[in-house]
Image (cartoon, rainbow, N blue to C red):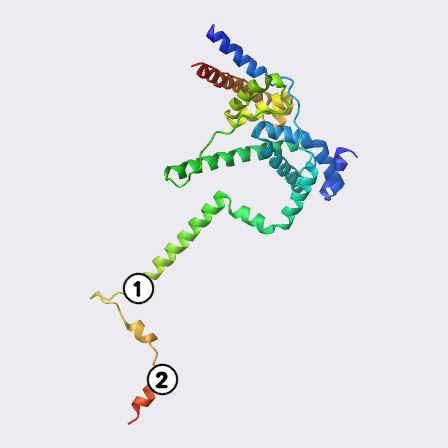
Amino acid sequence: MKDKSTEQQIEDALNSIDNIQHASPTPFFYTRLMARLQKDDQSSWGRIGSFISRPAIAFATILLVIFLNVFAIYSNSDTNVSSTGQIDYATVDEYSQVSSTIYDIENSKP
Amino acid sequence: MTEWELIEQLKLKDERAFKTIVDTWQDMVYNTVLGIVQNAQDAEDVSQEVFIQVYESIKSFKGDSKFSTWIYRIAVTKSLDLLRRKKRKKRFAFIQSLFGKNDELINDPPDFYHPGVAAENKENAAVLFKAIAALPENQHTAFVLSKIEGLSYQEVSEVMQMTEASVDSLLHRAKTNLRKTLGDHYRNSKI
């Protein structure tokens, strides 16, 4: 008896959309549509933003940034090391600048 | 103006042609979208997106299908896109709540009452629509196009780009799943 009642409820639910009428949007749908179309036309930054914010694009961009950072760090850590383990300061000497300031000139006078 | 003339005018971005197209198809688009997304505000937004897509992509319409079929396909695609976005948002919010970062309650959406359903059937229809929303995408789409939009099997097959036999199979499986979901609902409500 209970099962039959459940079966009847199922049938009633399935039949509830028989002769369903079509729904319509609220009035002035076209007016709102045109306003949105014109707004979308003006906002090219909005389109760029919505493109970048797509998950696949955003994820790929993040991966690219991480890869570039790792590559930069790996490249910079590749310095010359001598057999004794001391860092070679030759490059430092090559780039050292001898600058004369007014204090050096004054001090050098007898 | 014939349909083909309208389309040619729309390709030239003629506003009168666009208005005629919107006036002709807005009810069809809105009803289809509403049946899939089950929310009036979302249906309005998606319907606008459908016509914007029609306006922007009209040059890609080659006439190898009926114009109505082409519009139905856009409506179905946009509707399913929205449902997928909502699911992703819900999943993300759930994960955030696991880390205590989101205090928002993850609520079930309220019951959906389709405005085209007769008053005496509204409660039963609300239960049915909830069961429809739980169907897999293809079954959901086929059921809405056939039972709510009233398309023939041939028209549904053209929109979904599959054979009539496949549509028949989808609808059969949809009904089986709906019976199971409804059965569970009514049995649980009696406990």
Q: What is the residue that sits farthest to the bottom in this orientation?
A: A110
Looking at the image, the residue that sits furthest to the left is A84
Query: Label 2 to label 1, Cα distance in Å?
Result: 32 Å
Q: Is residue A94 visible?
A: yes
Pointers 2 and 1 in contact (C-beta within 8 Å): no
| Residue at left offset 50%, top offset 35% | B86
Q: Amino acid at mark 2?
A: Thr
Q: Is residue B107 left or right of residue B24?
A: left
**Rendered view: B159 above or below A13:** below
Left or right of A47: which side holds B9?
right
- Above or below: residue B99 compared with residue A12: below
Q: Quadrant of the C terminus of chain B?
A: top left
Q: Which residue is mark 1?
A: A79
Quadrant in which residue B145 is drawn: top right
- What amino acid is labelled 1 in the image? Thr
**Mark 1: few, some, or many residues within 10 Å (few <14, many ≥20)?**
few
Residue B42 x/y as whole percent: 58, 34
Query: Which residue, given by chain and number where applicable, does mark 2 sit on?
Result: A101
Q: Where in the figure is residue A97, as x and y percent of width and height?
A: 35, 78
Figure check: B19 above or below A81: above
Q: In the image, B72: left or right of A59?
A: right
Mark 2 crowd level (few <14, some 14–19, many ≥20, 10 Å Cα)? few
- The secondary element bearing badge 1 is classed as loop
Q: Nearer the viewer, residue B28 or B165?
A: B28
Q: Are marks 2 and 1 on the same chain?
A: yes
On the image, the x and y values in percent for residue B49 come to 62, 38
Q: Chain of mark 2?
A: A
The chain holding disc 1 is: A
- Of marks 2 and 1, which one's residue comes earlier in the chain? 1
Q: Residue at x 68, y 36 (%)?
A: A29
> Depth-wise, is mark 2 or mark 1 nearer the camera?
2
